Image (spheres, grey):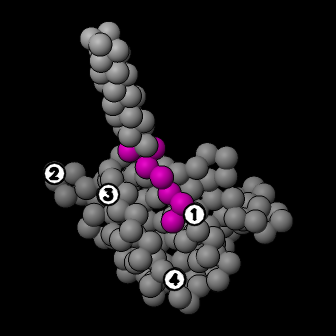
Amino acid sequence: MLREIKVASKQDGELTRRWYEDERTDLFVWFDSDDRIVRFQLAYDKPHAEKSIEWRTGRGFAHSRVDDGTTSSHHPGSPILISGGAFAKARVVTDFRRRATDIDIKVSLFVLEKLEGYVDEAARRAQREKAIVVGALIGGLVLAWVLWR
């Protein structure tokens, strides 16, 4: 179950950051001066295949894989986010719902609402392109039928 790391609350300029964690998940949430959530980062599938989904006001989502910095010599480096990888929305939402039962309800509801509203832009673009191709094919068939008559 996620629990808040109290010593981690921090001021980042005008933003306050809160951190929740358990053995498989980290959640960082940033609040503005009016106590509104303006950003969150959910790291999941820790520790072996860690990924991150981040949401920011005005920017939307970014999904990343976490490169733990391990090299072939097995010396730890600094973890970095690498763009890409599929977001397993249904699984992550279900898992977050189960893990977030003991955290601030405002935070858990906000994160769940955003995660449930996630739309994969690459998938949306592919659907749009497919619809254009299908529309062009149908239009061509209709034109051929009109001309053939």
Q: Is residue 36 magenta?
A: no
**First in residue order: circle 2 vs circle 1:** 2
Residue at left offset 16%, top offset 51%: 72
Give the residues drawn in magenta, as a range.
Answer: 116-123
Badge 3 amino acid? Asp
- Judging from the image, what secondary structure is the residue with disc 4 in? loop
Q: CA gap, disc 2 to disc 1?
A: 38 Å
Mark 3 or 4, closer to the camera: 4
Residue 50 spot, x, y in % from top left = 33, 63
The front one of 63 and 135 is 135
Badge 4 amino acid? Ala
Q: CA gap, disc 4 to disc 2?
A: 36 Å
Q: Is residue 126 left or right of residue 31?
A: left
**First in residue order: circle 3 vs circle 1:** 3
The front one of 102 and 124 is 124
**First in residue order: circle 3 vs circle 4:** 3
- Judging from the image, what secondary structure is the residue with disc 3 in? loop
Instruction: Say if mark 2 contacts mark 1, CB within 8 Å.
Output: no
- Quadrant holding the N terminus: bottom left
Badge 2 amino acid? Ser
Badge 1 amino acid? Lys
Instruction: Say if mark 4 contacts mark 2, CB within 8 Å.
Output: no
Q: Identify the mark at residue 68; answer none if there is no mark.
A: 3
- Judging from the image, what secondary structure is the residue with disc 2 in? loop
Q: Which residue is mark 2?
A: 72
Mark 4 or 2, closer to the camera: 4
Q: Is residue 38 left or right of residue 20?
A: right
Q: Which residue is mark 4?
A: 100
Mark 2 or 3, closer to the camera: 3
- Judging from the image, what secondary structure is the residue with disc 1 in? helix
Q: Is residue 22 left or right of residue 149?
A: right
